[in-house]
Image: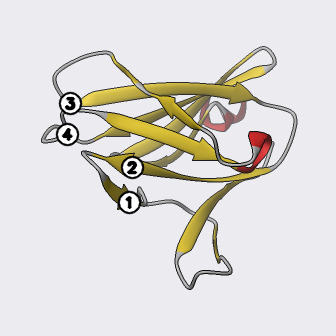
Amino acid sequence: MVAFLSLFTGCADHYYRVKEDTVHIYIRKSDAKVIYFASSLDGYALHKAKKIDNHTWEVTAPAYVEFKYFCIADGVIYLPPCRFKEYDDFGTENCIYIPGM
């Protein structure tokens, strides 16, 4: 049971699934037409999220390294509900992915 629970982190609107060495980040935002993902992994370059159903978007990243991230939904910065956050140099928040947490 503990192993199963460790595969899922977050809340219903935002959660992770770790599969081997990749973390799949799911964002539920049914009103969005397009979502971009930006992370500290590559200097916050924008990556288009994949829409997997009418409500859910998916992006992937390495599962073994900590990183900070946020999203842009329909041109507006969107921070999904996340367990770990920090303020950036611009006074806004970023989510933090911590492996194993």
Determine whether, in the image, residue 35 is placed left or right of residue 21.
left
Earlier-in-chain disc, 3 versus 2: 3
Q: Residue at x 16, y 23 (%)?
A: 54
Earlier-in-chain disc, 1 versus 3: 3
Disc 3 or disc 2, which is closer to the eye?
2
Question: Disc 3, disc 2: CB below 8 Å?
Answer: no
Q: Which mark is residue 68?
A: none
Q: Nearer the viewer, residue 2 or 49?
A: 49
Q: Is residue 92 above or below residue 25?
A: below
| Quadrant of the image occupied by residue 63 | top right
Q: Residue at x 52, y 27 (%)?
A: 59
Percent of width and height locating residue 62? 78, 28
Residue beneath disc 2:
72
Disc 3 or disc 4, which is closer to the eye?
4
| Any part of residue 100 in sight | no
Residue beneath disc 4:
32
Earlier-in-chain disc, 2 versus 4: 4
Mark 1: give few (<14), some (14-19) or many (20+) Cα within 10 Å.
Answer: some
Question: Disc 1, disc 2: CB below 8 Å?
Answer: yes
The N terminus: image quadrant: top right
Question: Disc 3, disc 4: CB below 8 Å?
Answer: no
Residue type, mark 1 in image? Ile
Residue beneath disc 1:
77
Determine whether, in the image, residue 72 is placed left or right of residue 15.
left
